[in-house]
Image (cartoon, coloured by chain):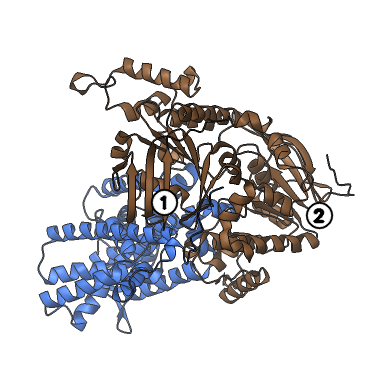
Amino acid sequence: MAETPHTVALLETRGLTKRYPGVLALDTVDFTLQPGEVHVLFGENGAGKSTLISVLAGVQPPTAGQVLFSGRPVTLDSVRTARQLGISAVFQEFSLVPTLTVAQNLFLGDEPRKRGLLDLVRLRSGAQRLLEQLDFPIDPGATVAFLSRAEQQMVEIAKAFRGKLSVLILDEPTASLTEKETQRLFSLVERLKSGGVGIVYISHRIQEIRRIGDRVTVLRDGRKIGTVDAKATDEDRLIEMMTGRPIAEIYPKIGFDPGERLLEIRGLRTANVLDASLEVRRHEVVGIAGLVGSGKSELMRAAFGIDDVKAGRILFRGRDTTGLRPKAMLEAGMFYLPPDRKEEGLVMSFTAQANMTLPALRRYPQRRAMGWLSKIAQSQLSERTAERVQLAFRNVMRPVAHLSGGNQQKVLFAKGLVHEVDLFVYDEPTVGVDMGTRSALYLLIKELCEAGAGVVVISSDLPEILHLCHRVYVMRRARLVTELQGAAINEANVLQHFFGEDRAT
Amino acid sequence: MTETPANAGHDEAHERAGPRGVRAILKAIFLKLGVLPFLLAVALVMFTLLSDQFLTSQNVVNLLRQSVYLILVSLGQMLALVTGGFDLSVGTIQAVTSVVSAMAMSALAALYPESAGMAIALGCMAGILAGMAVGVVNGIGIAYVGVTPFIMTLGIQSVGFGVALFLTGGVPVSGIPTAFGEIFGFGTVLGVPVPILITIVCVAGFWLLLDRTALGNYFHAVGGNPKAAVLSGINLRQVLMLAYLLCAGIASLAGLLLTARVESGEANIGGTVALESIAACVIGGVSLRGGMGRVENVVLGAIFIGLVQNGMNLASVGSYLQMVVLGLLLIVAVISDSLRQKYFTRA
């Protein structure tokens, strides 16, 4: 384990613990940040990274433990206190007010004033100076809602620079940036490093970690697993530390035996997709990868009839299904699992059983003569299905709002198993679920695929794409740009297509 | 290794421009100002055709004088809307103010018949305090207890109206010093009616508040993204509290001016003002989702409502049908707001 010897750490936590009702989000975590260092936090969703940075940024207080700033114990009881020490965080969920201008957002809560009124001149020139200093080409007078995601991200970053800066916390800052913008962010990070600023950096991209990280601290289930040298530690080792098990155990080997062509998309164009053609066959797992906003999700949403098709054709099992609505697509044998289970997937106040059987309610034997629902048939069906997704029986009758993220996702998967389905489309299938659930869901995908179904996995989780899929399509800027197969499915190759021609610049 | 060649893309999906020209200009106007310019154009043309008295200078002054009460309430309503809520109790606030101030004035005038000035001043104060008390209750419920603005102000609307009726027994309160009506109802300074002057001062004040102070920014921030506001160190509860308090204060002022106009304290003085003020705001481009709204547009929105009512009066459309039109206008405005929001979120 690499521990850089240094006299006094810039920021240090000792035995930091955060407990929420029923969850130990942080469990006695010791963490140090040196001046001029990029310290990467690595771990799965729910491992405690976000909790750690929100404590460091003063968003929420720890349950126990200590935070030291330059060797002195400090109480970070508000964002303001943290900022006064020079600790600024750029969160992944933007903390911008979309209806205000860039300048108003940059100085929100800390506006320059003159005789009680806003000093508009200083507000604007201050914002201008801030943006120029960072080399961000953004008009301070523009309304934030009209900026692109990347521009909003830049505003978010610029906000951190409005006061003095000693610790900068970046939560997946490159998630919505192009390669060129990423490059600019990285050179900014380099500049800050040489100025002695310490940087806490959350990222899932292993390449990125190697590119700018100095040390990596891996968290799992709220505990610190270890701190290692960012340049000297290889990918598999990091993933094993993150997951607590060898790679081979997480991703099952799935038999590949492409058969009947289930889905064919030709020259598809929608509001969010410019051009995409693909096919999916039985007995294969097809991945669709791309950055946020690349249109990878919208592509399949159009195939399932959620989004309107403007041009192109969609064929399902040889039949033209262009323009059919989800109800018809479900009946044809296609299942789409939405990425946001709370928003689109589940009725949160319903029990797991009610959610699971919802798609099957119109079918015999749930439906009896005169339209009455059969409770017995429902509970038999739900128990059978719960077993297939490894959902414990005691959870079947509980409202899904009370279930963990992993169990909710199992219920969502179960919705695809209560009727005949030939093609399963999983959009971000493992967002916010624990490792145990993850491998259970992967095993289910293996079982479905080997039993003759076609499976599409749309994912922002690169390892999932790399280790699970037989074939991979990559989307970039609303276009399907490439198809990869076999040995061509590797991180460098996929990432290269994420960014495309931008990479050269 | 199979790789289809990368499709050399020129632009992103959302950068595709629609057909330029008139449609694009109309769309830009719609995004910037909302539905008001279009409605205004339709109304002006229609009423000018329907009645030749509509576009006379006398009618325009008349229209302005009739509109000031709604303008004032709409300013307050706008604060509530900008913070992401609304206030259904503005009518009740007017009623409480009217009744309390009239009762205080007539009681004081009976006790000290020779000092009408003092009776008027104290009566006004009592009325405003009573109206703001309603605002405090709203604010506590919404900001500190966490009741949704809809339920809180709907409930208070009934409570306040009940109290006003209870205090008066349903009968108008008379015995107000005549000077009150002469000054605040019908008086003029340099030829300009006093209610219009007061309204001009209030509009200027609200414009300064919303456009030129940090607090004005905070109202927008709290409505636009409450989480961001908190992360920026803004006291969310305090800002919400202030919004409902100021809303009550200015609604109360409008209630006083109305009382002066009718020269008696009336419990049913603000019957439809909640609906009208929300309509005025939304037509004036204030978003029901919070975070968006400009004072000058709200003033225009309120004048527009006044104009529609005035025009319908001149065209001898009955008051029952006017209610139909008003309700429909509100719905049209809300639909246009959500259309506009769609453009905003897509951008």
Q: Which residue is mark 2?
A: A35
Q: Amino acid at mark 2?
A: Pro
Mark 1 Cα shell of 10 Å, populated few (<14), some (14-19), many (≥20): some
Q: How far apart are the two marked residues, 2 and 1, measured between alpha carbons?
A: 50 Å
Supply the letter of whichever chain is blue.
Answer: B
Residue B177 to residue A23: above or below:
below
Q: Estimate the x, y position of residue B256 in percent, counting from the top left.
A: 33, 63
Q: A73 left or right of A421?
A: right
Can residue A305 be seen at all in this image of the molecule?
Answer: no
Quadrant in the picture for residue A385:
top left
Q: Estimate the x, y position of residue B342 in percent, counting from the top left.
A: 37, 58
Residue at 78% of width from left, 50% of height from top?
A: A214
Q: Estimate the x, y position of residue B275 in percent, counting from the top left.
A: 27, 56
Q: Amino acid at mark 1?
A: Ser
Q: A48 left or right of B323?
A: right
Q: B229 left or right of A340?
A: right
Q: CB of mark 2 within 8 Å of CB of mark 1?
A: no
In the depicted view, which residue is nearer to us: A187 or A179?
A: A179
The numbered mark 1 sits on a residue in which chain?
A
Q: Colour of chain A?
A: brown
Name the secondary structure under disc 1.
strand
Q: Estimate the x, y position of residue B330 in percent, counting from the top left.
A: 26, 58
Q: Which residue is mark 1?
A: A277
In the depicted view, which residue is nearer to us: A64 or A317?
A: A317
Residue A203 to residue B109: above or below:
above
Residue at 74% of width from left, 55% of height from top?
A: A85
Name the secondary structure under disc 2.
loop
